[in-house]
Image: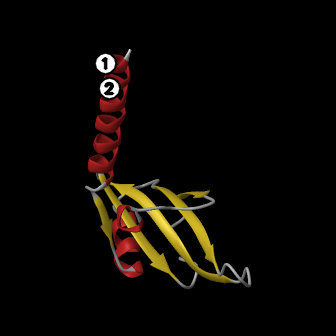
Amino acid sequence: MAAGAAVTAAAAAARRNRIVATAAWGVIELEPDQFLLALALEAEPLVVRSAVTSFWTNNHRYYRYLAAVKGAQIFCESTPELALHAGAILVEAKKIKIPSDM
């Protein structure tokens, strides 16, 4: 029975390492103006936005944006809300985490 538990633990560790390795590659952090320029390359980009608030006061501090453009995952943080172009599809998220957060 111990051999089965060891195999299960090894498989779980391999899966966790694969997830961490996948998450560690490919998120490009941009300044807000560069993020908007990159979004202009797509006709209808899917943009995920989350508002970051202060824990103690629940006041809005800044926005986090995540999108995929030409296969690259791009990310930015902006204090003011970004003015996305008319074709952008905006999805509100509770939280956005990127590899540097982990």
Q: Amino acid at mark 2?
A: Ala
Identify whether 34 is placed above or below 12.
below
Query: In this view of the protein, which residue sits in the foreground, 15 or 90?
Result: 15
Find the residue positioned furthest to the front: 2
Q: Residue at x 51, y 71 (%)?
A: 64
Identify whether 8 is placed above or below 95.
above
Q: Residue at x 61, y 58 (%)?
A: 93
Q: In the image, which disc is placed on residue 3?
A: 1
Identify whether 85 is placed above or below 9.
below
Q: Amino acid at mark 1?
A: Ala
Residue 43: x, y in percent?
Answer: 42, 55
Marks 1 & 2, CB-CB < 8 Å contact = yes
Q: Residue at x 42, y 58 (%)?
A: 67
* Helix, strand or loop at mark 1: helix
Query: In this view of the protein, which residue sits in the foreground, 82 or 1?
Result: 1
Q: Residues within 10 Å of mark 1 (few under 14, many from 20)?
A: few
